[in-house]
Image (cartoon, rainbow, N blue to C red):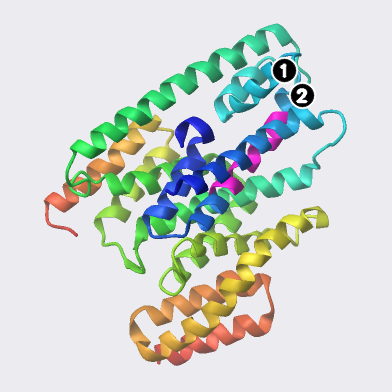
Amino acid sequence: MPLLAIGVLAAITYSFRLAGPLLRGRVRISQGAEELFAIASAILLVSLAATGAITEGHGFAGWARPAGVLVAGVLAARKAPFPVVVIAAAGTTALLRLAGVA
Amino acid sequence: MSLVVFAGGSQIAATSVVITGGSPAAAVAAGALLNTRLVPYGFAVSGITGRTWWTRLLGAHLTTDESVAFALRYSTRAGAIADPRRASRAFWGCGASLFAVWNASVGLGVLAGTTMGNTGAFGLDATFPAVMLALALPALSRPRTRAAAGGGALVAVALTPVLPAGLPVLAGLSGLLLCLPAGRRRGESKADAGGGGRGESKADARGGGRGESKADARGGGRGESKADARGGGRGESKADARGGGRGARRAGI
């Protein structure tokens, strides 16, 4: 990632963090806005997961990767520990590739 | 990056946008949006990060999902901090140790990554989306969020073949429209912010998507225009949805 982009993201992130302590008592965030941000974050994460799992460049990524992500998703939904989820994703994909699935 | 941004989800999100060939601007936008949740966090813990300005500046940087969660264990249901001293200890303890461990681990990961030749054989490319999914899951217990996220993801995947990398994910924010009718007008500004990216991508999609579905009718075209109609169309104008549907029919038959 370019250094400038990292710097900008860092600055934005820090200003988000500082907003609370600075504006405390003067501004209140409406519950609706807060909820909307939460939903937007969820959309972004799921969209990233979906495109990251299914696509590579402008095309299809092959079956091994989405299969790994699917296994990870099922494990995460069953409240498996985070490391297990991540390792299961990599492991499933690696094994499928070893077996010749692209 | 890990030292100065120090927000895991956004670091991974921004990195994955760049890895897939997205522009730095799209990466920053995705990362920044994920971090908007830090704003309410900041308000929540503003009472316990100390009185002097420098502890506040430092405390702000350690504001994360985890440190806030630990601090808020000492708050009442109404949101007031019941035991400020213990809450403050929990916040600093968790924040500082997380900062140390997180950055050390990132460093180790970088070292390991450079010595490991073919990361694809180890399935490491599957870990990025898996982490994203795992992070999103708790929020998906609510039906409204689930609908919005599902719609958004559909739009994002459908637009990936036609949009420059990084933009499809931002276009996925149009999924917000799915939950707007139930919501109040409060979120106007946010919807607008999403609108900028969306308007842009919409035009692209219509131009590119239709052209493509005519060209290679059976392949990607069909599912694509259908997904488009369902995801983007519902929130927007009906004409658009019908247009997409017609495109799909023409492509399919």
The kind of residue on which mark 2 rests is Gly
Residue A9, image x, y percentages: 56, 44
Residue with the mark numbered 1? B75
| Image position of B118 (left or right of B22) | left
Residue A76, image x, y percentages: 42, 38
Residue A76 in view of the camera: yes
Residue with the mark numbered 2? B79
The magenta region covers B31-43
Residue B79, image x, y percentages: 77, 24
| Image position of B59 (left or right of A48) | right
Q: Give me the residue at 64% from left, 39% from top.
A: B37
Q: Secondary structure at mark 2?
A: loop
Mark sitting on residue B196? none
Rendered image quadrant of residue B222: bottom left
Do the residues at pointers 2 and 1 share their chain? yes
| Image position of B253 (left or right of B95) | left
Rendered image quadrant of residue A77: top left
Residue B6 in view of the camera: no
**Is B32 included in the stretch rendered in magenta?**
yes
Q: Is B184 or B19 nearer to us in this picture?
A: B19
